[in-house]
Image (tube, rainbow, N blue to C red):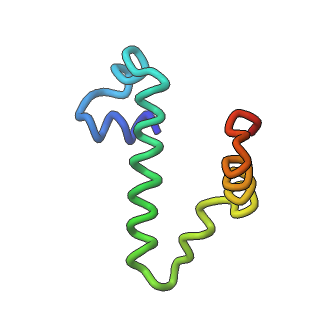
Amino acid sequence: MIDAMAERYGVLPSKILREGDTFDLMIMDCAFTYRKFIEAKHDPKQDITDMYDQEQLKQVMESTKNGNRNKL
């Protein structure tokens, strides 16, 4: 991931290691996941539901419905 971030921002990986933080990693992860989602959405052979654990999503939904947002 460090290499991908360095390539994306046009800096050396050592600069990412020196100056990057977990927020940068989170943003990069979101960007990669979104790109994968868009590519899968436009390819009928790919199943986009395999990107997420369906049972965990159901638990989150039920927990939210019941007003227990912080219990996950």
Q: Residue furthest left?
A: 10
User: Is 36 on the left or on the right of 48, as rendered?
Assistant: left
Residue 2: image quadrant is: top left
Q: Position of residue 9 (x, y in %)?
A: 26, 35
Q: Where 40 falls versus 12 (above or below)?
A: below
Tell me the residue at 60%/70% (across/down). 49
Q: Where 23 falls versus 63 (above or below)?
A: above
Q: Position of residue 11 (x, y in %)?
A: 26, 28
Residue 19: image quadrant is: top left
In front: 50, or 70?
Answer: 70
Q: Where 6 falls versus 60 (above or below)?
A: above
Tell me the residue at 42%/55% (across/down). 34
In front: 16, or 72?
Answer: 72
Q: Where 3 falls versus 64 (above or below)?
A: above
Q: Residue furthest bottom?
A: 44
Q: Position of residue 14 (x, y in %)?
A: 38, 21
Tell me the residue at 39%/69% (across/down). 39
In front: 56, or 50?
Answer: 56
Q: Quadrant of the C terminus?
A: top right
User: Is 15 on the left or on the right of 63, as rendered?
Assistant: left
User: Is 13 on the left or on the right of 59, as rendered?
Assistant: left
User: Is 61 on the left or on the right of 29, as rendered?
Assistant: right
Q: Position of residue 8 (x, y in %)?
A: 28, 41
Q: Residue furthest front?
A: 66
How many tags in the picture?
A: 0
Tell me the residue at 30%/39% (across/down). 7
